[in-house]
Image (spheres, rainbow, N blue to C red):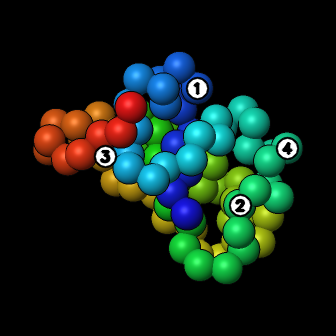
Amino acid sequence: MLIDVRPVPSYQDGHLPGARSIPDSELPGRLTEVPREGPVVVYGATTLEAVGAYERLRQEGYSDVRVLIGGFLHWVVLKYPVER
């Protein structure tokens, strides 16, 4: 699962293909939407923006959690595909 932790307006402006919007501030109340099996990748505008979500998921027992290094801004700079 790919989770965009940026605010909803940022997600709506563009996001990684297949990403689901779960803003960092909403994550604690939406953990039931995050599968416990398989990898979970979180990203924000930058790497730093996703670290809180990563730590929260790890504390909740998610063992296969990763952060997209560079975040969305790096993704765009590299000209990778973006959904709107």
48 left or right of 22?
A: left
Near mark 1 (Cα within 10 A), the count class, few <14, some 14-19 or many ≥20, is few
Q: Earlier in the sequence, mark 2 or mark 4?
A: 4
Near mark 3 (Cα within 10 A), the count class, few <14, some 14-19 or many ≥20, is some
Which residue carries the number 3 mark? 70
For the residues labelled 2 and 4, the Cα–Cα distance comes to 11 Å
Q: Quadrant of the C terminus?
A: top left
In this view, the mark in front (4 or 3): 4
Q: Quarter-wise, where is residue 52 in the image?
A: top right
Q: Earlier in the sequence, mark 4 or mark 3?
A: 4
* Residues at discs 2 and 3 in contact (Cβ within 8 Å): no
Near mark 4 (Cα within 10 A), the count class, few <14, some 14-19 or many ≥20, is few
For the residues labelled 2 and 3, the Cα–Cα distance comes to 22 Å
For the residues labelled 1 and 3, the Cα–Cα distance comes to 19 Å
* Residues at discs 4 and 3 in contact (Cβ within 8 Å): no
Q: Earlier in the sequence, mark 1 or mark 4?
A: 1
Residue 24 versus residue 83: which sits nearer the camera?
83
* Residues at discs 1 and 4 in contact (Cβ within 8 Å): no
Residue, x 38% and y 46% (percent of image)?
16
Instruction: Residue 29: tell me if it is visible.
Output: yes
Q: Earlier in the sequence, mark 2 or mark 1?
A: 1
Q: Earlier in the sequence, mark 2 or mark 3?
A: 2
Residue 34: give its label.
Answer: 2
Q: Which type of secondary structure does the marked residue at label 1 adopt? A: helix
Where is residue 10? Give x, y as percent: 47, 24
Q: Earlier in the sequence, mark 1 or mark 3?
A: 1
In this view, the mark in front (2 or 3): 2
Which residue carries the number 4 mark? 29
Where is residue 25? Give x, y as percent: 72, 33
For the residues labelled 1 and 4, the Cα–Cα distance comes to 16 Å
